[in-house]
Image: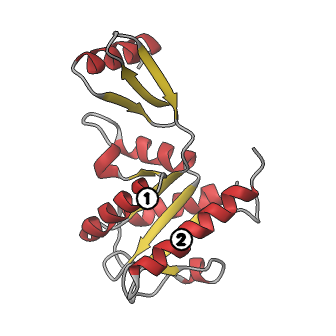
Amino acid sequence: MSAEELALVIFQSLERGGRVEVDGLGVFRKDDGGRISLRNSNRTRVFIAYAIEDVDKAERLYQDLESHGYAPWLDRKKLLPGQNWQQRIQEAIGNADYFIACFSRNSVGKRGGFQAEVRYALDCANRVPLDDVFLIPIRLDACRVPTRISRETQYIDLFPDREAGLERMMKAMERNRRRKPV
């Protein structure tokens, strides 16, 4: 899509009311005077990977992150009709500040998209400085975290105390974000 085509889509969407969010760019709004503004998005980007059987838990995690000021990315919320979903998911993972892998009894032995996303995130993690956090494995239930991940990366349990797990996860992201140079 060219810049002109994108501008037209944004303008037409704003004419219908509301706002338009462009991942990695910001939020376009139209005020009462008809002026269009762009609010830069500098929120921390968090990609959420999950097995389809865990969609309810992934959507709840998305809501939790969004309510705490993060910019979560979940396929069901961000993919648009007609988009090349594989390409868009890889872009979202590559642009993310953090990748949250939701491990569960449903996801660990399943073949398909979740495993591909985790493998791609591991490749992306190779480009991140060694002391930085990128991959954050979480367990949604009492499952086994794959050895390739558990031998190098500490995971967080969102059970039996979900709130304590969320707090720990957000604390890790905040501590890592403060360490990074601006």
Badge 1 element: helix
**Mark seen at residue 158:** none
> Between residues 78 and 94, which one lies in front from this camera angle?
78
- Residue 30 vertical position relative to residue 144 in the rendered view, above or below: above
For the point 76% across and 64% down, the residue is 130
For the point 75% across and 58% down, the residue is 179
Which image quadrant for residue 85? top left
| Residue under label 1 | 65
User: Local crowd at mark 2 within 10 Å, few (<14), some, or many (≥20)?
Assistant: some
For the point 31% across and 78% down, the residue is 106
- Residue 30 in the image, given as x and y percentages of width and height: 35, 18
Disc 1 marks a residue whose amino acid type is Leu
**Mark seen at residue 169:** 2
Q: From this viewpoint, which residue is outermost toward the left?
A: 16
Badge 2 element: helix
> Between residues 103 and 132, which one lies in front from this camera angle?
132
> Between residues 12 and 68, which one lies in front from this camera angle?
68
Q: Would residue 23 appear left or right of 125 to someone viewing this image?
A: left
